[in-house]
Image (cartoon, helix red, strand yellow):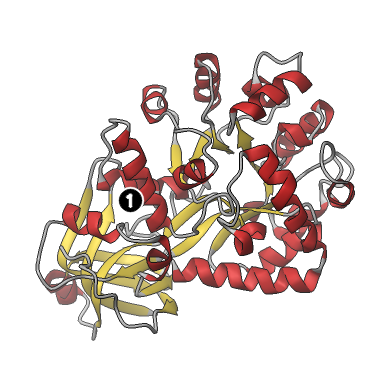
Amino acid sequence: MRTLFRAAILNPIDAQSWEFLDDGGLLVEDGAIGTLGRFDEVVKSHPLEPIELDGVIVPGFADIHIHWVQHAVRGHYAQALLPWLATHIWPEEARYADTALARERAEMFFADCLAAGTVMGMSYSSPHPAAARIAHEARRGDWITGNVIMTTNAPADLTAASAKPPSDLAVLPDTIGRAHYAVTPRFALNCTARDLAALGAFARYQGLAVQTHLAESEAEVREVERLFPEATDYTDVYDRAGLLGPRTVLGHCIHLSEREWSCLAARGCWIAHCPSSNEALDSGRFDLDTAWRYKIPFALASDVGAGPSHSMLHVMQRFLSQHRAAGVHVTPEAALFYATIAGAHAMGRGAIAGSLSLGKRGDFVLMPRATRLRSPQAWFEDLVQGPMAELERRPLGTWIAGYPVFMNPRPRPSSPAPPC
C-alpha cells in the first residue's frame, strides 16, 4: 500500500534543529516512511494522487511516563506527593480490581491519547495483573506497560493484588510480550530491598525495560534515607538492586546529589522529565543544565494523573515556560525533539519511530495552520499556547503507520494558529 500526503511538514532532527517544508510530500509505503521531501520533487518520482491535508504534519508524540489508571482523575487534587498518593491515588487505583471498569477506562485513555496526538509511550498500570493485560489488549499505538509492584507501605488491598517478587514475575511478560512490558516497582518506598533485587535480577535476565520514580519530592527522599540506611542515597537503593541501566526510565529525578547524577550517567539511564506534574505537586524544577552537563538522556512526559493533562502540547508549553522563567535557554526545536525522537529512543524504538525519517513507521499528527506565513519557530510557539483543555483538542488528525486513527470533528479554534 502506498499513500502520498501533501501538507506543510515539520520534522525534528535533533535538539537544535528541524527540517521544515512549506509544501511537503510524505510517501507512506506498507506503513513506513518511503520518501519525504518537497512535494513537486516527490510526486515526480511517485506519481500518485495525493491526500491533501490543510495543516502542518509533525511526528506523533511519545509520552514516556504516564499512569493510565489515573487518567480519569488527572489534575483533580493539589497536595504534596506522599499525602496525594495515600489520600487520592491509591484509593482510585484500588478500583481497577474491577475488570469491567478497567476495560472502559482503558478505551477512554487510548482514545484521548490519539486525539491529543500521542501515538506511543510508557504507562504505569495499577498493581492488578489483569488491569495490565487489559491495557495491553486495548492499546492503540506502540506502548510499554507495567503493573506497579507494591509489597509494603501501602493499603492492604493493593499489596495483596500486587505481583510478589520473585514468584509472580514471569506471567505478564509472557502474556504481554517482552517488547511491551516493563518491570515497574512503583518507587523504593513500596518495596523492600529484597523485592527490588529480585526485580532487578528478573529484568536483566529477561532483557526487560524498567520504569520507576526517583527523587520526585524532598519528603520522599528523606523517607527513603530512613528506610534504607545501608544505601548511600536514593539512587544507590536502585543501583544496589541492579535496576539501573540503559533500558531504565526514571521519572522526575529532581532532588539529586552530584554523586547521583554521576551514577545515572555511568549506568546510561534515561530520565522522564515531567514539567507539568512537577508544577502541579510543587515538587521542584528539574535541573536541565545538570542533565545536559552529565549528558544524561531524557524525554518529556505528562505523568498523568499528577500531570493535569495528557496533551504533550501542554507538556511542551510547561517545559518552555518553566525553564525560561529560571533563565535556562530552551527552544521550540528542543521541545519537539524531547516529545518525539527522544521518547522513541527511551522506549528502545529509536530506529523505527519518533520522526519522519526514511524507513520509520508512518506515525504523524496534523496540526492547524494559519493563512499568514510565519517562521516555523513562531508557528510552534503559537501552537503550544492556550489552556490545556484546548490543547488536548488542537490536533486535526492522527495517523499510525499511515492509517488515520483520529480525525477532529470539531471546527478549528478561532485563536491565531500556527503556520509556517
Q: Secondary structure at mark 1?
A: helix
Q: Is residue 27 left or right of residue 404?
A: left
Relative height, residue 139 to residue 350 (above, below): below
The one nearer the camera, 14 or 2, is: 14
Q: Tell me what residue is drawn at x 28 percent, y 38 percent.
A: 330
| Badge 1: residue crowd in 10 Å (few <14, some 14–19, many ≥20) | many
Residue 28 appears in the rendering: yes
- Residue 385, image x, y percentages: 30, 58
- Residue 351, image x, y percentages: 43, 50
Looking at the rendering, which quadrant does residue 131 occupy? bottom right
Quadrant where the C terminus lies? bottom left
Relative height, residue 208 to residue 236 (above, below): below
Q: Amino acid at mark 1?
A: Leu
- Residue 72, image x, y percentages: 62, 64
The one nearer the camera, 154 or 46, is: 154
Quadrant where the N terminus lies? bottom left
Residue indicated by mark 1 = 336
Q: Tell me what residue is drawn at x 65 percent, y 23 percent.
A: 234
Q: Tell me what residue is drawn at x 44 percent, y 33 percent.
A: 285
Relative height, residue 244 to residue 18 (above, below): above
- Residue 111, image x, y percentages: 54, 72
